[in-house]
Amino acid sequence: MSLRVRIVGTGLIGTSLGIALSRRGHTVTLSDPSPTAVALARDLGAGALPDGSEDPELVVVAAPPDVAGTVVADELRRWPGAVVTDVASVKVAVLRDVEAAGGDTTRYAGSHPMAGRERSGAVAARGDLFDGRAWVVVPHPASSERAVALVTQVGVEAGGTVSVMSPEDHDAAVAVVSHVPQVAASLVASRLRSVSDSAAGLSGQGIRDVTRIAASDPQLWTQILAGNAPAVRRVLDDLRGELAEVIAALEHLEQGDGVGAREVLARVVAHGNTGHDRIPGKHGAAPTTYAVVTALVPDEPGELARLLHDVGDAGVNLEDLHLEHGLGQPFGLAEISVLPGVAERLAEELEARGWRLHG
Amino acid sequence: MSLRVRIVGTGLIGTSLGIALSRRGHTVTLSDPSPTAVALARDLGAGALPDGSEDPELVVVAAPPDVAGTVVADELRRWPGAVVTDVASVKVAVLRDVEAAGGDTTRYAGSHPMAGRERSGAVAARGDLFDGRAWVVVPHPASSERAVALVTQVGVEAGGTVSVMSPEDHDAAVAVVSHVPQVAASLVASRLRSVSDSAAGLSGQGIRDVTRIAASDPQLWTQILAGNAPAVRRVLDDLRGELAEVIAALEHLEQGDGVGAREVLARVVAHGNTGHDRIPGKHGAAPTTYAVVTALVPDEPGELARLLHDVGDAGVNLEDLHLEHGLGQPFGLAEISVLPGVAERLAEELEARGWRLHG
């Protein structure tokens, strides 16, 4: 069943959604404060410009978090028959803004497609941006069944993996799985500002992984953190409490008074083990532990391809792959994650094909 | 020039070093409190068992951080002509233990090969464990020139990328680039313990990267953190100060008093950007920013190989590769990092070969 969808805001998310929905045969109209941005989105196949006969069943507000609520309220008023959603990465604050503006909030249910924050703008848009990414539908208690159904449908049509959460549960969840990791990565990376080049030169894969997202955009993240301030603050408070225990334990050890201090350190690392195990594996809800086969790969075009060709030839499915760099060495280390039952066979096959395996 | 090296402690590091040095033609003898461990190391080609005629020029103590200093002091006494080093990942505490035990400390200079902490034991040993990894030589003011030269030589012969630092500089550096990231990863992962399955299910690549090392061994990390307590505590104190600013800013925003609060959040994320830029790129000291081309890869044996074969065929050198999983989807996203100048051509080549690229 073809939908009539109006998209307000033709940045990365709005334009990508327009492309995805247009490809699926839905009728999409586009709106943006910038005539250039909306024309670009149209040229990219995201939809048509309104011709005066617009009559949307669903309006998707793809505006920044700090204005999304106001725009949602405007659209609710403008289209009395339409369901309205937004795609902001915080949901309580947006709902509060919608409610504060008055109007028929039964026709509103929020969304959060968890995709594509590292680049921005229509120019980076792709119709497959949401493929396989989590798309959270976030109704509030007054949301109508029709609103929830339409917003769910658009997430599914866009290619997302849809789940449903309340605004409070959503914001608490993303505080833990997204916003606090961002703060932690920034705080760890921040410490590198004051070290010598030779100290920074000792950076290995650990700090590279921990700080990868520290390269994120300050302006966007200020909006996200400010928009989810209560939930992020609660999680950071917990983190600060455990950090204080670590610091106190280290102080006791410095003063030669280590009774109980090592137990604190071991407990914090063990808690990290337990929490890390909660992250779902690739193939569904249950965490999976993969075996890792590590091979040395010469730093030349085609060598990694040859390795992975050999992995495929061995009939082994690669579950994850991580390439680690040597310091100034002419090769990298390819860490090949596979199901534990096939690791030994894979290692034998690769060695038989002349690959040097590692640790 | 062939060296006579005695290795005390045949775990992962000691055995790997023995294999590497034996392959280079050096004469290695092995010692370990466990007869099984030392026999296994011998069988793996790490060296010979002592036959009574042992006369080492260099002794490498590969014992855990909390006993390394005592063992170094024992070996200095036992072999009055030999230089002695250790491989513990903390250096001030080991030196303090060596000095406290008395004896000729001019023949001691520390080492820290930064390799291979994720698995342990001789059974995981490989002769190429140190290839391309940082190997820090850590003399103290009384170390003789001969001691520094021999310890440097062994790092080079083992395949490491050798640099020299004082014990204090070393411990301050690894606190920032290794120990504090570990604590932060554990603290972030720890927060996942109390969330619902549906919240944990929203985990994306960000938190996966930030918490990867949270899976590390609590016992080993307790020793490392306790052994570097002063330096780790100083860095964590700084981090706690910046964290307190973030929490205060979020509290102000919660209370509707956001004056200056957003500036604090933006500054912390910007500081993270600056720190992240300090991490050296692959090909030397200067950080390199790569362009990323992302392709959808069907989750079937051989598909990733085909992609990378096509990358190689295009004559483009892959600088880094990261495979991201869809949630329950039959494909992954391969993020291909390349030099910025070739990204556009690569994208065209891949699309011409039928690959679906991704925002």
Image (cartoon, coloured by chain):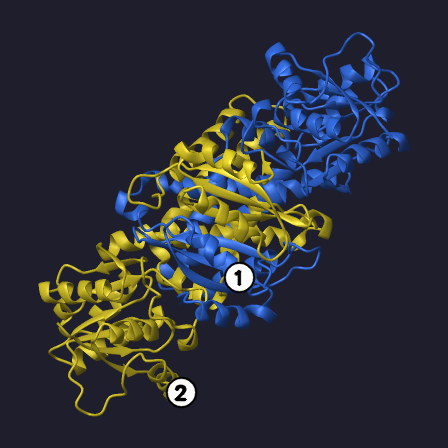
Chain colours: A blue, B yellow
Q: CA distance from mark 1 to mark 2?
A: 35 Å
A98 to the left or right of A16: right
Query: x, y (%) of residue A137?
Result: 77, 36
Q: Is residue A227 above or below residue A237?
A: above
Marks 1 and 2 belong to one chain: no
As rendered, which of A119 and B350 lies closer to the eye?
A: B350
As rendered, which of A99 and A48 lies closer to the eye?
A: A48
Task: Look at the image and tell me whether residue B318 can be seen.
Answer: yes
> For residue B251, what is the image quadrant?
top right
Query: x, y (%) of residue B32?
Result: 33, 83
Regarding mark 1 in the picture, which secondary structure is present there? helix
Query: x, y (%) of residue A80?
Result: 87, 16
Q: Is residue A6 above or below residue A169?
A: above
Give the quarter of the figure containing the N terminus of chain B: bottom left
Q: Which residue is mark 1?
A: A311
A126 to the left or right of A245: right
Report the residue that reaches farthest toward the bottom.
Answer: B52
Give the quarter of the figure containing the C terminus of chain B: top right
Q: Which residue is mark 2?
A: B36
Subunit of mark 2?
B
A179 to the left or right of A302: right
Subunit of mark 1?
A
Disc 2 residue type (three-letter): Thr
Residue at left offset 15%, top offset 81%: B79
A322 to the left or right of B354: left
Disc 1 residue type (three-letter): Val
